[in-house]
Amino acid sequence: MSFDDEKLKKICRGNERLYRSLNTLGLFLKPENIEQKEKEIIEKITHIEKNPKTIDDLESLYRILMRYYLYTGSKDSLVKYAQKEKKLLKSEEYISIIKNPSVAIGKVKEYYKV
């Protein structure tokens, strides 16, 4: 699956902040392929958080899980990792996802037509 920016713009029209958040995440990953790796990714995150190597490692792992949780509709887990990335990067990039995960999940489901 390749990322379709125009499709995402259409789905998010009227909510530019959410569009930017979802666009930054990039909805090109096939989230259904992550399910079997979720536990492994969480274990990697836990290890890196205890023994930090580079921010890039955590950032990419947080984003993978955020995409997955957007796809599966797991609001609590989505917010948890969006908040972790927000704290890590000291960025407001995912504030629209943190404040209203249901809307973000709905837009992603529409994007993937789940």
Image (cartoon, rainbow, N blue to C red):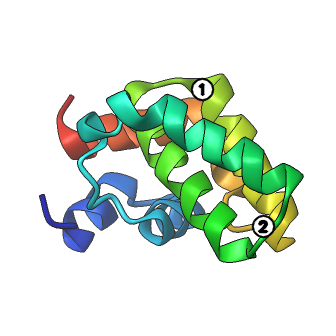
Residue at label 1?
75
Q: Residues within 10 Å of mark 2 (few under 14, many from 20)?
A: some
Residue type beneath disc 1: Lys
Q: Residues within 10 Å of mark 1 (few under 14, many from 20)?
A: some
Q: Earlier in the sequence, mark 2 or mark 1?
A: 1
- 56 sits left or right of 12 in the view: right
Whether residue 36 is visible to the viewer of this picture, yes or no, is yes
Q: CA distance from mark 2 to mark 1?
A: 18 Å
Which of the labelled discs sits on residue 92, or is there none?
Answer: 2
SS assignment at label 2: loop
The image quarter in which residue 101 lies: top right
Quadrant (top left, top right, bottom left, bottom right) of the C terminus:
top left
| Up-down relation of residue 5 to residue 39 (above or below) | below
Q: Position of residue 4 (x, y in %)?
A: 19, 67
Q: Look at 47% across and 63% down and name the residue there.
A: 25
| Up-down relation of residue 39 to residue 12 (above or below) | above
- 53 sits left or right of 23 in the view: right
Whether residue 98 is visible to the viewer of this picture, yes or no, is no
Quadrant (top left, top right, bottom left, bottom right) of the N terminus:
bottom left
Residue type beneath disc 2: Glu
SS assignment at label 1: helix
Q: Residue furthest left?
A: 1
